[in-house]
Amino acid sequence: MKTVCTITVNSPNEKEVFRRYLPPDDYQFVELVERGRPDWLASACRQNIRCDALIISGHFDGGDQFYTDRLDAREFLPVAELERASCSESCPGVFSQLKEVYLFGCNTLNGEAMRSASPEMVRSLVRAGHSPADAERLSRLLAERHGESNRDRMRHIFKDVPVLYGFSSKAPLGRSAGPLLERYFQSTTGTDVGSGRVSPKLVGLFAASSMTVAAGLTDADPHAGFRTDVCHFSDDRLSDAQKLAFVHELLGRRMAEVRLFLDHLERYTQSLMATERRTRETVAALEAIANDRAARERYMEFARDADQPAVQVRMIDLAEKLGWLSPDEVQAEFVAMIANRMARNAIGTAEVDLVCGRQSAQGLEQARLPVAAVRRGNVAQSAVLACLGSGERRTDVLRALSSGNDDDVAIAQVYLRHRPVADADEQRSLASAVTRMAPSDAQVRALDTLASQRLADPESLTELARLYPQARSVATQRAIAGILIRADYPVPARAELARSLRAHRLKASESDDVIDALIRRLQATQGS
């Protein structure tokens, strides 16, 4: 008798069809999810349940977890937990004799790489002595090996499993997948489930829904070594000292390769710092890394050369966790990065978001930015200085929201997400300026920004309501409705506003949107 294991974190449709059509004398079903028990996967592993086929049903967010949209369920399945169980070989029953895995979730076998070669990787390889042509070639090879698409991750997790069914893009919901499976079972005996052989008929029925097939990684695969490397971070059989020894060895490799391991390094060091599991051996391993000056210099050289500011900041923060930078040195590196980008006039929304979102940004002194690097009239640079505490530059950024320049409006939008307006006079001035803008995409973006500010000033709300009948586009009307639906609109004016929304509404293709939602809310609260 074959055992079909199911992990149902969302719709049970797929599981129920399999159960209904497979002969009970030949197949038994075991649901691994225990409702209300967070360690249900570990519990199943301890019970030594042996699975011939595994059906996982759940929404998939593109790399991190299977989850549910059902209000009566809270279970989810982190991919990291699957990786831990697979790498640790702590779940021999569930994983060891699997012949097939059915991954009913979007993008579960999407082959698009999550990581790709970056220009700084090529430059790093050239600095290490490679010719530009060799550097380009090695960079591509490293990116291919470390791309870690969803397909790659599932192949790593379900090592040696002959058949993995999944979806390269959007998967059908359970209520649609169920009837397709019924058609499949009605046209076959179904006894090949758990056989380890691909069913062309099943793939054909789901072809329009992007179903695809893969096989689990084997030791003969050219990328098997990468799985071994990745497993060092999640194998429970390894102590932290052993994992840190691997981290140290990894940091001695080409920095281009270290860059591609950045996600794994961040996750592991974060988990280590969040616990008190500091044995004498762990402390010694951390000290060995901290004292490796050669690795530190190569790492920091690469970090300072990173093209993307977010990558540079992540590498700086990781350097602190590795003992290579003190908090003051982290601040100095961060300021130097911003100053360098200011000097090159290379400040944009990404840099503004980083500075404004950095918890320690308020402690940075503007004086530490070279005066020559600051360009007057540059909205992005003004936003950086405003996030560091400049009231004068804040005024410049708020003015930019109604400038009509889409790039400047985008900068103001990012800034206001971190530094919202709370003062009534400031709200009133901002709303008035936005309503006076010429109709444009920039005005719609500015209105969307106001919506996130949750305006409470009655005068501002009234002015925005007056703009609605004059709007020339559905996008503008929706943006105004987005502001008003979040606001506590005065009760006496609600009936009048609802009439205006209905009377002046422009035609739209969608039958129900935020304007309809606002009308319903106004009607429901008129008598309250």
Image (cartoon, rainbow, N blue to C red):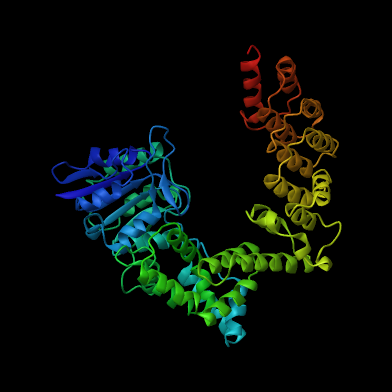
In this view, the residue in front, 362 or 406, is: 362
Q: Position of residue 386 (x, y in %)?
A: 77, 52
Q: Tell whether 259 sits left or right of 388.
A: left
Q: Is residue 423 above or below residue 349?
A: above
Question: Taking the image as drawn, is residue 193 in sight?
Answer: no
Residue at image point 33% right, 57% down: 164
Q: Position of residue 340 (x, y in %)?
A: 74, 69
Residue at image point 64% right, 72% down: 304
Q: Position of residue 336 (x, y in %)?
A: 70, 68
- Residue at the far front: name it: 280
Q: Tell whether 54 sits left or right of 511.
A: left
Question: Taking the image as drawn, is residue 312 in sight?
Answer: yes
Q: Is residue 237 above or below residue 120?
A: above
Q: Position of residue 244 (x, y in %)?
A: 41, 71
Q: Tell whether 289 sits left or right of 20.
A: right
In this view, the residue in front, 15 or 153, is: 153
The C terminus lies in quadrant: top right
